[in-house]
Image (cartoon, coloured by chain):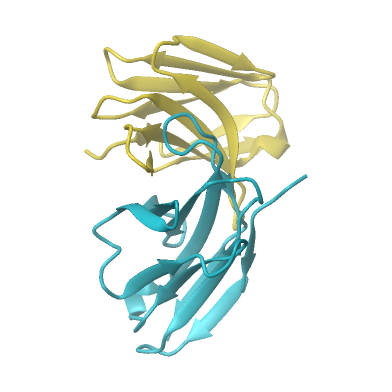
Amino acid sequence: SQQGEEDPQALSIQEGENATMNCSYKTSINNLQWYRQNSGRGLVHLILIRSNEREKHSGRLRVTLDTSKKSSSLLITASRAADTASYFCATDTGTYKYIFGTGTRLKVLA
Amino acid sequence: EPEVTQTPSHQVTQMGQEVILRCVPISNHLYFYWYRQILGQKVEFLVSFYNNEISEKSEIFDDQFSVERPDGSNFTLKIRSTKLEDSAMYFCASSTQGAISGELFFGEGSRLTVL
């Protein structure tokens, strides 16, 4: 598997429900970030969690990080149709690059 | 709000032609990146650039690719002789702090179509 793999690949939920996406990675990291990409657009930063943090919140977003399992999850609570997008995790391994995962395509049905 | 701008938004070219994609990073940022995304797929790292030199590059970034910061504002990606498989969305990004702790700010991308 590759550094940064999200699952599920696609997720379809009803408006108001919670959406959970997972990211697994292979090497040690300094931090992990989540990005959102609307169709045909650039990526937008959502949240960063450092390797010494276990949980972080930002508005309706909750991110967890388990460095022992090399995994992270992104929870979007009370989802809205506007949350429909692809979500990517990105890991920083201490070099001058971030490695992006394969992405989860989230569809929120109104 | 400051933003990363990319031009052109879409370029169509013939195989074997040279292409230059341009980016204007956010003015006080020091680290610059190019990524590419083949339609709807994984976002792939190409190259990072700091202090007027390449910091890291991927195996995709072969001799056909080059980057340059010709002045204080532009950051360009040149593909010397395009191939069909170079068709993709190319994203420029910049950050203040590099890969250690920096949020990446992305442009809207340049779609390259190679015929």
Judge left or right: residue A1 versus residue B57: left
Chain for colour cyan: B
Can residue A58 be seen here? The reply is yes
Q: Colour of chain A?
A: yellow
In the image, residue A76 sits, relative to residue A34, either above or below, namely above
Question: Which of the 4 image quarters holds residue B16?
Answer: bottom left
In the image, residue A91 sits, relative to residue B88, either above or below, namely above
Q: Residue at x 47, y 29 (%)?
A: B101
Can residue A100 be seen here? The reply is no
Judge left or right: residue A80 versus residue B111: right
Give the camera-side residue of B76 and B35. B76
| Residue B99: percent from left, percent from top | 42, 36
Judged from this view, the residue extending furthest toward the right is B1
In the image, residue A87 sits, relative to residue A42, either above or below, namely above
| Residue A71: percent from left, percent from top | 34, 21
Of the 4 image quadrants, the one containing the C terminus of chain A is top right
Q: Residue at x 55, y 48 (%)?
A: B94
Give the camera-side residue of B13 and B7. B7
Please give the count of numbered marks on the rendered protein: 0
Give the camera-side residue of A63 and A52. A52
| Residue A89: percent from left, percent from top | 44, 34
Q: Residue at x 37, y 53 (%)?
A: B44
| Residue B21: percent from left, percent from top | 52, 72
Of the 4 image quadrants, the one containing the N terminus of chain A is top left
Judge left or right: residue B90 versus residue A4: right
In the image, residue B110 sits, relative to residue A58, either above or below, namely below
Question: Which of the 4 image quarters holds residue A17?
Answer: top right
